[in-house]
C-alpha cells in the first residue's frame, strides 16, 4: 500500500492498494493526509488477517492429503532435507530399521505402542539402548518436520519419552597400562598411544587420523590438530609438543619422508581410519583383560593433566572443548591421593563454617557488577540480606555472563530468559505453540478417541464410497453398523458428518497455529516472543 499526493484533485490524498483475494489494484481518495494514513493503517491490518486466512486455507488443502502420507514418505522427505552428506548417511542407516517395520504404515496412525514394540525388537536383536533411542528419536524428529511442512496435522509421537542410558564413566588407562600397550603394539598403534596421551586428541578420523606432517612444526615444537566438526574451532587448534615426544616425532618424520607419506598416523604409508583389530591384539599381548578403548587415551590425558595441577581452561583448549564444563563433567578421573587430599580439605560437621549452600541462599556476581539471584532466576538490583553473594571467577579473572550461564547449567540451576539467546527463547515458544494446539485439538474433540482415529481414514473412505455406490464393500463399517443396530446408510452419514467436523476443527486450529508461528518468525526481540500468548478458539460455525 502507498499514499500519494495530487494537488489538482478535490481530495488530493490518495491510497493505492491491492486486495489480497483478487489481487486487483484499488484506490481511495481523502481530503486530508491524516484520514489517508488512518485508512492505510486500518486496511493494512485487515489485509494481514485476510492473508493469514488465505495462507491457512492453502495449508488446509495440503493437509487433506495428509492421511495418505506413510512413514516411508516422512523418512524420505526428512532425509532429503539434510544437507550434510555424512549426517544424511548416518540418519538413513538408523532409520532403515524403522522403515523395514513401519514403512507402509500411515504416518498419522503411528502410536506410542508401536514405538514401544520397536524398542523391544531392537533389544531382542542386541541393539544398545542408546542406539535404539536414537532411531526412535529420529522418527519423532522427522514427524516434527512433517508437521512444519504441512504433511501431518500433528506429530503422533510428540509425547514419546525415551529412557536415557546411564552414562558410563570411562576408566582411562593408567600410565603403567599405557606403557604396556605401547610396548606391545604395532608401529602405527604406537603412534596413536604416544600422541593420544600427549595431545588429548579425539582418536579417530575426525582428528588424530587426519593429522598430516604439514601440520607439525618440529622447529617450534607445536602442531595444529585438525578440529572435529563438533568442536569450538573448525579450523584446528595449536597444541604444544611435549619435549619427551619431540625426538620420537622427528624420527618418525624422517621415516615417512623417505616413502613420501603425508600422514602422521599411517599403515605402511597409507592413511588409517580404524585401529580396532590392531588395538585388541596389543591389549592381548600386553596381558590387559579389562576394557580399554583407543578413545580412553583422550580421557587419560585430561585426568593425568588435571591431577598434575594443569589449568582447567588450558586443558579444555588443548582438547578442543568450547569450555571447561565438559572437562569437569565427563573427563576428570582423580587418583586416590587427590581424592584423599580433597576430602581432608573439605570442612566436616565439626567445622565452624558450613559450606553447604541451599539454592535460595545464592546470588552470583559477574564481572560487570550485576547480581543474579539463583532462586528467582533473574538479575536483581540488590542482594537480599538473607543471601550470600558469590563472585564468579574463570581462570583467576571475574567471569562474565557466558560463564554465569555455564555455571548455572553445570549445577543444574534454572537459566532464566535474560540469559537465553533469542533462538533459544523462540524454540521454547514454538514448542509451547505446538503443545497448546495439540491440547486444544484433544479438548475440542472429546468424542474422537485415539483408537477410533486410527481407523478414521478407512471409515471415511468406505462411507464416501458407499454413498456414491451402495454396492461398495464396507468391511469395517458393515460390522460396526450391525453391532450398533443401525442401518449402514445411516452410519455412513454419521461418519461423513463426523469426519467433516473433525477436518474443520483441526484445520481451524492448524491455521491459528501457523499464524502464531508466522508471528514468531517475525519476532526480533525476546520481549516480542514473550508477548505471544497462543490461545486456540473456534468460530460459532466450527464449534
Image (tube, rainbow, N blue to C red):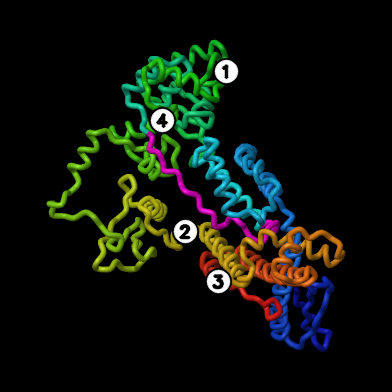
Give how far apart the Cα atoms at labels 4 and 1 are: 24 Å
- Residue 490 in the image: above or below residue 330: below
Assess whether residue 24 is covered by the magenta stretch.
no
Asked if residue 152 is among those painted magenta in the image, a careful observer would answer yes
The reply to whether dot 4 and dot 2 touch (C-beta < 8 Å) is no
Please tell me which of labels 1 and 3 falls first in the chain: 1
Q: Which residue is mark 1?
A: 270
At horizontal 21% and vertical 54% (from top left) the residue drawn is: 355
**Which is more toward the observer, 249 or 351?**
351
Q: Earlier in the sequence, mark 4 or mark 3?
A: 4
Dot 1: element: strand
Q: Which residues are magenta?
A: 148-170
The residue that mark 4 highlights is: 296
Prevailing secondary structure of the magenta residues = loop
Mark 3, secondary structure of its residue:
loop
Residue 310 screen position, x and y as percent: 31, 35
Name the residue tied to disc 2: 420
What residue do we see at 55% from left, 20% from top? Answer: 262
Image quarter where the N terminus lies is: bottom right
Label 2 secondary element: loop
Q: Is residue 75 left or right of residue 471?
A: left
- Indicate the position of residue 474 as horizontal and vertical percent values: 78, 60
User: Residue sitting at 32 percent across and 36 percent down?
Assistant: 333
Amino acid at each position: 500500500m502507498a499514499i500519494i499526493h495530487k494537488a489538482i484533485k478535490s481530495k488530493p490524498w490518495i491510497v493505492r492498494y491491492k486486495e489480497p483475494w483478487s489481487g486487483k489494484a484499488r484506490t481511495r481518495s481523502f481530503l486530508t493526509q491524516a484520514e489517508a494514513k488512518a485508512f492505510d493503517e486500518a486496511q493494512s491490518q485487515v489485509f494481514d488477517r485476510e492473508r493469514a486466512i488465505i495462507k491457512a486455507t492453502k495449508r488446509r488443502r495440503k493437509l487433506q492429503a495428509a492421511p495418505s502420507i506413510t512413514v516411508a514418505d516422512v523418512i524420505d522427505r526428512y532425509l532429503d532435507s539434510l544437507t550434510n552428506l555424512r549426517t544424511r548417511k548416518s540418519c538413513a542407516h538408523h532409520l532403515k530399521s524403522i522403515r523395514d517395520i513401519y514403512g507402509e504404515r500411515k504416518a498419522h496412525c503411528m502410536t506410542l505402542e508401536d514405538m514401544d514394540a520397536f524398542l523391544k525388537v531392537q533389544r531382542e536383536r542386541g541393539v544398545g539402548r542408546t542406539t535404539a533411542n536414537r532411531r526412535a528419536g529420529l522418527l519423532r524428529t522427522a514427524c516434527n518436520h512433517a508437521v512444519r511442512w504441512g504433511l501431518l496435522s500433528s506429530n503422533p509421537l510428540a509425547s514419546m519419552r525415551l529412557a536415557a542410558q546411564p552414562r558410563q564413566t570411562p576408566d582411562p588407562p593408567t600410565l603403567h597400562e599405557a606403557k604396556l600397550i605401547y610396548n606391545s603394539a604395532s608401529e602405527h598403534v604406537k603412534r596413536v598411544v604416544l600422541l593420544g596421551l600427549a595431545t588429548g586428541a579425539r582418536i579417530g578420523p575426525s582428528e588424530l587420523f587426519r593429522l598430516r606432517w604439514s601440520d607439525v612444526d618440529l622447529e617450534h615444537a607445536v602442531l595444529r590438530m585438525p578440529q572435529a566438526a563438533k568442536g569450538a574451532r573448525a579450523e584446528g587448534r595449536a597444541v604444544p609438543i611435549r619435549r619427551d615426544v619431540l625426538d620420537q616425532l622427528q624420527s618418525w618424520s624422517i621415516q615417512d619422508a623417505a616413502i613420501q607419506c603425508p600422514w602422521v598416523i599411517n599403515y605402511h604409508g597409507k592413511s588409517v581410519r580404524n585401529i580396532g583389530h590392531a588395538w585388541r591384539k596389543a591389549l592381548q599381548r600386553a596381558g590387559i583383560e579389562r576394557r580399554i578403548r583407543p578413545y580412553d587415551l583422550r580421557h587419560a590425558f585430561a585426568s593425568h593433566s588435571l591431577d598434575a595441577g594443569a589449568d582447567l581452561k588450558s586443558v579444555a583448549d588443548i582438547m578442543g572443548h568450547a569450555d571447561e564444563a565438559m572437562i569437569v563433567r565427563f573427563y576428570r578421573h582423580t587418583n586416590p591421593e587427590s581424592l584423599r587430599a580433597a576430602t581432608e580439605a573439605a570442612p566436616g560437621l565439626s567445622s565452624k563454617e558450613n559450606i553447604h549452600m541451599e539454592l535460595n541462599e545464592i546470588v552470583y556476581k559477574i564481572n560487570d557488577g550485576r547480581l543474579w539471584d539463583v532462586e528467582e532466576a533473574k538479575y536483581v538490583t540488590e542482594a537480599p540480606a538473607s543471601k550470600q553473594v558469590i563472585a564468579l571467577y574463570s581462570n583467576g579473572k571475574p567471569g562474565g555472563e557466558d560463564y554465569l550461564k555455564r555455571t548455572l547449567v553445570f549445577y543444574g540451576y534454572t537459566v532464566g530468559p535474560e540469559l537465553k539467546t533469542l533462538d533459544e527463547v523462540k524454540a521454547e515458544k514454538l514448542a509451547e505453540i505446538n503443545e497448546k494446539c495439540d491440547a486444544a485439538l484433544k479438548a475440542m474433540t472429546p468424542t474422537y478417541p485415539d483408537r477410533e482415529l486410527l481407523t478414521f481414514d478407512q471409515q471415511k473412505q468406505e462411507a464416501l464410497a458407499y454413498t456414491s455406490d451402495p454396492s461398495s464393500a464396507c468391511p469395517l463399517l458393515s460390522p460396526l453398523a450391525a453391532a450398533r443396530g443401525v442401518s449402514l446408510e445411516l452410519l455412513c452419514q454419521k461418519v461423513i458428518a463426523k469426519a467433516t467436523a473433525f477436518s474443520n476443527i483441526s484445520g481451524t486450529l492448524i491455521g491459528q497455529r501457523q499464524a502464531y508461528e508466522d508471528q514468531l518468525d517475525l519476532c526480533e526481540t525476546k520481549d516480542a516472543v514473550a508477548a505471544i500468548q497462543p490461545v486456540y478458539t473456534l468460530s460459532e460455525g466450527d464449534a
